[in-house]
């Protein structure tokens, strides 16, 4: 096969993929619209739309109002053609999200079921997930598979969980989690998954650091890259993540904040996690973060002081991250879902620390506070399907 022929095939594939993504990311589009927006000739658009209709991925959904000439046919993707499930494993809960080709949360559930590394747990976890799917009446041929989010270091090459302090396990096979799930499963670190959920619907991507402030602190580094690299590579969302040499890139929780400071769960002292995980706040309100922010809003003096100190320490971490990465910083995780009313205060604090900037507008609250990790895990399956369209 000549190089030119391979290249032509690749271009054909990339065109079809771009056309499908464009239709899928919009409610209704016209064929001339696609041609203009993507810079692809009308005959190529027509041929690809016909192929996508044949594949059951797009359909005609009426006409656009005439602007003088012939009315243009409206095209939309069939978002319910395929579904995927996201499973977020935490120390005490199992989070579930159902999504389709739209990448939106269609249904979600969170169940109290503490993790143990046992056959009994894996069996029950699979039962809970399958029961959730069954309720939706989704058939096997419209189901893409499951994505499993884990609070730990994922070694995807060896298909193992290298380390998870939250789950108290190290060096265990993926198979443990997927043994009782009769579908294709993929695995991802929880903060990486949440960052994918966060960035998924953003059309004009940008460099970002996602700081996940949950029961432990995690993070993800997202590099803005063109969605299509070279001739025959169609990027998966995962390719946007910087993972480092040992899959530990973005473990911001264990950056030293205070030398010889508070004991961290990792065994070291003074880690950022020991000061700014959600646990640092919920210990004042019986483990309930919502309660913390309710009381804070009502003007609780003691909590106000605790929150102010928390934000000051968080500002140090944020400023350090800004210095290293020079990009947007998104505050996510449990604390991130409550941070919006306080973001300007945090911006003020980071601005005071910053050598180069007088405002903290690069700092943003997360958009996806609900089951972001489970959604991001499910999106892995959606993306790997869409990449092959
Ligand atoms: Zn630590």
Image: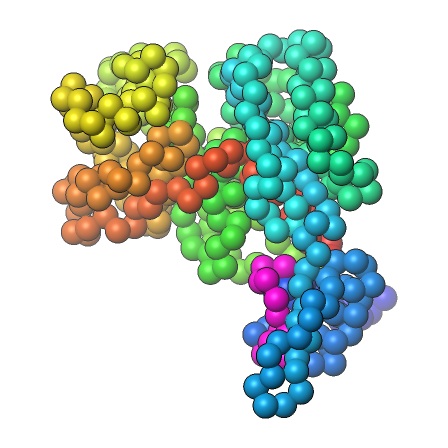
Is residue 47 found left or right of 261 in the rendered image?
A: right
User: Up-down: is 288 above or below 107?
Assistant: above
**Count of picture labels:** 0
- The residue closer to the viewer here, 100 or 325, is 100
Q: In the rendered structure, which segment of residues is drawn in magenta?
A: 24-36
Q: Is residue 30 magenta?
A: yes
Residue under the image location 35 percent in, 49 percent down? 328
- The residue closer to the viewer here, 133 or 351, is 133
- The residue closer to the viewer here, 149 or 13, is 149
User: Up-down: is 348 above or below 115?
Assistant: below
Q: For the view shown, which residue lies furthest in the bottom direction? A: 68
| Residue 76 at x, y percent in the picture | 67, 63
Residue under the image location 72 percent in, 26 percent down? 130
* Residue 163 placement: quadrant: top right
Report the quarter where the C terminus lies: bottom right
- The residue closer to the viewer here, 111 or 324, is 111
Is residue 23 found left or right of 280 in the rendered image?
A: right
| Residue 9 at x, y percent in the picture | 77, 67
User: Up-down: is 41 above or below 75?
Assistant: below
| Residue 238 at x, y percent in the picture | 58, 44
Query: Colour scheme used in the picture?
Result: rainbow
Report the quarter where the N terminus lies: bottom right
Q: Is residue 166 magenta?
A: no
| Residue 345 at x, y percent in the picture | 19, 40
By secondary structure, the bulk of the magenta-drawn segment is best described as helix
Residue under the image location 41 percent in, 26 percent down? 214
Residue 350 visible in the current orientation: no
Residue 30 visible in the current orientation: yes
Residue under the image location 60 percent in, 23 percent down? 161
């Amino acid at each position: 096969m000549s190089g030119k022929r391979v290249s032509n095939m690749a271009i054909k594939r990339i065109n079809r993929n771009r056309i499908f993504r464009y239709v899928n990311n919009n409610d209704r589009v016209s064929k001339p619209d696609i041609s203009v927006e993507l810079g692809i000739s009308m005959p190529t658009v027509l041929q690809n739309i016909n192929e996508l209709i044949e594949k059951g991925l797009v359909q005609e959904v009426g006409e656009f109002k005439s602007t003088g000439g012939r009315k243009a046919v409206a095209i939309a993707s069939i978002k319910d053609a395929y579904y995927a499930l996201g499973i977020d494993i935490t120390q005490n809960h199992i989070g579930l999200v159902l999504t389709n080709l739209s990448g939106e949360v269609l249904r979600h559930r969170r169940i109290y079921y503490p993790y143990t590394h046992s056959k009994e747990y894996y069996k029950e976890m699979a039962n809970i997930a399958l029961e959730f799917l069954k309720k939706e009446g989704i058939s096997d041929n419209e189901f893409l598979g499951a994505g499993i989010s884990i609070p730990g270091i994922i070694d995807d090459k060896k298909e193992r969980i290298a380390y998870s302090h939250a789950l108290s396990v190290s060096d265990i096979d993926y198979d443990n989690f997927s043994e009782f799930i009769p579908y294709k499963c993929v695995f991802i670190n929880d903060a990486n998954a949440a960052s994918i959920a966060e960035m998924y619907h953003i059309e004009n991507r940008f460099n970002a650091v996602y700081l996940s402030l949950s029961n432990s602190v995690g993070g993800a580094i997202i590099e803005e890259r063109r969605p299509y690299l070279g001739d025959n590579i169609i990027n998966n969302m995962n390719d946007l993540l910087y993972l480092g040499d040992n899959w530990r890139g973005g473990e911001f929780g264990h950056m030293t904040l205070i030398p010889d400071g508070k004991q961290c769960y990792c065994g070291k002292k003074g880690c950022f996690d020991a000061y700014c995980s959600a646990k640092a706040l919920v210990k004042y309100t019986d483990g309930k973060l919502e309660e913390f922010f309710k009381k804070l809003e009502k003007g609780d003096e003691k909590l106000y002081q605790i929150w102010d100190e928390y934000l000051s320490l968080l500002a140090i971490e944020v400023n350090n991250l800004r210095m290293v990465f020079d990009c947007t910083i998104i505050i996510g995780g449990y604390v991130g879902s409550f941070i919006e009313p306080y973001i300007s205060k945090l911006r003020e604090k980071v601005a005071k620390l910053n050598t180069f900037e007088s405002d903290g507008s690069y700092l943003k609250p997360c958009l996806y506070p609900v089951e972001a990790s489970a959604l991001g895990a499910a999106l892995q399956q959606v993306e790997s399907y869409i990449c092959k369209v």
